[in-house]
Image (spheres, helix red, strand yellow):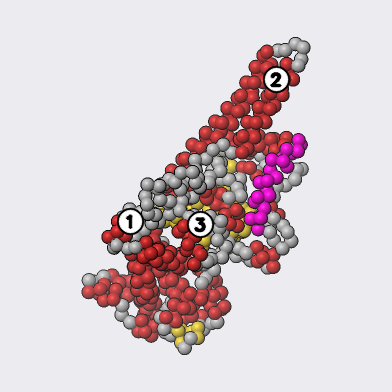
Amino acid sequence: MGKKKKKDIIRLERESVIPIVKRKIISALTNRIEGRNEKDEFVKLCQRAEYMIRAWYLLHFEEMMQLYALFEPIHGDRKIEQHNLTPEDVDICERHFLNCLFQVMERSNFKITTDGEIDVALAAQYRLNLPIVVDESKKVISLNQLDKKLFTKYFSKHPKDNLPHFADKYIIFRRGFGIDQMTAYFIKHKINTIIMRLWMLILTITGLKWLLFRKKKKRRRPQQPIDGDGLSRQEDPTTIGVNIDDMVDEDDDEDDLFVERIRIEKMPLSFSNLFGKVTIQEPTFDRIIVVYRRESSSDKKETERNMYVKHFKGIPMADMEIVLPEKKNPGLTPMDWVKFLVSALIGLATVVGSLSVKKVDIRVIFAILTSVGGYCVKTYFTFQSNLVSYQSLITQSVYDKQLDSGRGTLLHLCDEVIQQEVKEVIISFFILIEQGEATRQELDGRCEDLLKAEFGENCNFDVDDALQKLEKLKIDDNGKYRCVGLREANDIIGTTTEEVVLKATGGVAASTTDATTTTNLLDY
């Protein structure tokens, strides 16, 4: 039996985001409360908590949207001119908008991707088979060039830890994880994998492998996470968003999420699966938001202040390059050039050897040249096929994977913040009324246990944020983590403006009975 290949496993962290729909949470928790009046009071409290939290954030969100109006790609420059803002004024507004944006990102549980996470994500290939990079050409300033002043100035005054190497040009925020799978025959990929394995075997035997790949490993080595025993990612599960020291000092948490990368390149190919369907698998970033600015064209005296905010969903980690702004058109890979060169040398050596024979067979020489030429043509057309696949994938990402951009993305983020805050308050308050007073650690554990038992979701509940909101709502008792009754909590909040409007217009939420019915109907 041959040596068993090691699995390519990625360890993912539990995130603070609560993925369950708010209506489903309210419905499930309401059904656990006994008594019709208590259920109505709980539904009313959930509504009032959302109204209050929405009101708290309204001014902050409104300010952020007004600031973004100065930097949106369509009419931003015109609005700057209409307000007669000086460059210094625009700088202040720019810095203030970025402050608001980063706060909203943090509140909605988005995190800035680090170099280590990027390296882990791009350490494999999934659908993309070509190296994709951002166009950083400095020969001619064009619309395809990214501005480096925006984030350089901002981070110089607001430093952050673990910024990626590309933080001067663009920022990538990520949140949540998922799994993408494809099932097909992949005949072409299997054949290419077999050829590549034979090719690597030849390079290993001849000693060329060490010469060709030495620099590549040396360049990537400092960015690979190393654990306390000096083991690289090949000897330890890869990590996204988890401190490598935690993996060394602590035992594996039963709630940790381990996802295996299933790739054809790592599969043991045999006659049983060579011509049959196989399933490949890759973890995904559930949400990705990219923020950047383009460089001004050379015919403009002043710097363009437009900012681009792109929102994507379900991006495979190995194909994360598709979200990069202003990508270069890919070219032949170094391995393709090596194939061309080695094939030419082999063909030339074979032809010279044939010519040294006393009796030269022209047909043999023709066959050799045809084979070498055919292999070169095959390599070129393989590249062209990969290029077509790349363009198709980019087009698909624009139409299918991109959720929104600009103002639409910011509005979505604002709503995400409110929904997360409301769900944290509802869950923590319910635990306190159902299970009684608790310390911070106990409340944190109980909320996480509830999410796992009731909804089957493992997440890192943000108990500090929840307790902060409960204190603001004044429904705790003297700072201790015990709650007042439902009716008293509703009386403390009082009738909200939204309830007055709904009552005046005969809205559904004017009646708590109707509200409970609506909650049950919208349980999805």
- Look at the image and say whether residue 244 sits in the magenta stretch: no
**Distance from label 3 to label 1 (Cα)?**
22 Å
Query: Residue 415: x, y in percent?
Result: 39, 65
Q: Which residue occupies 66% across, 27% down?
A: 344
The answer to which quarter of the image holds residue 41 is bottom left
- Look at the image and say whether residue 221 sits in the magenta stretch: yes
Query: Residue 75: x, y in percent?
Result: 31, 55
Judging depth in this view, the residue of 17 and 183 nearest the camera is 17
Q: Which residue is mark 1?
A: 77
| Residue range (magenta) | 204-225
Q: Which residue occupies 69% across, 35% down?
A: 199
Total labels: the figure holds 3
Judging depth in this view, the residue of 63 and 281 nearest the camera is 63
Q: Main secondary structure of the magenta part?
A: helix
Instruction: Indicate left or right for 32 with 179 as reference.
Output: left
Residue 364 visible? The answer is yes
Q: Which residue is mark 3?
A: 168
**Distance from label 1 to label 2 (Cα)?**
65 Å
Looking at the image, tell me whether mark 1 or mark 2 is earlier in sequence order. 1
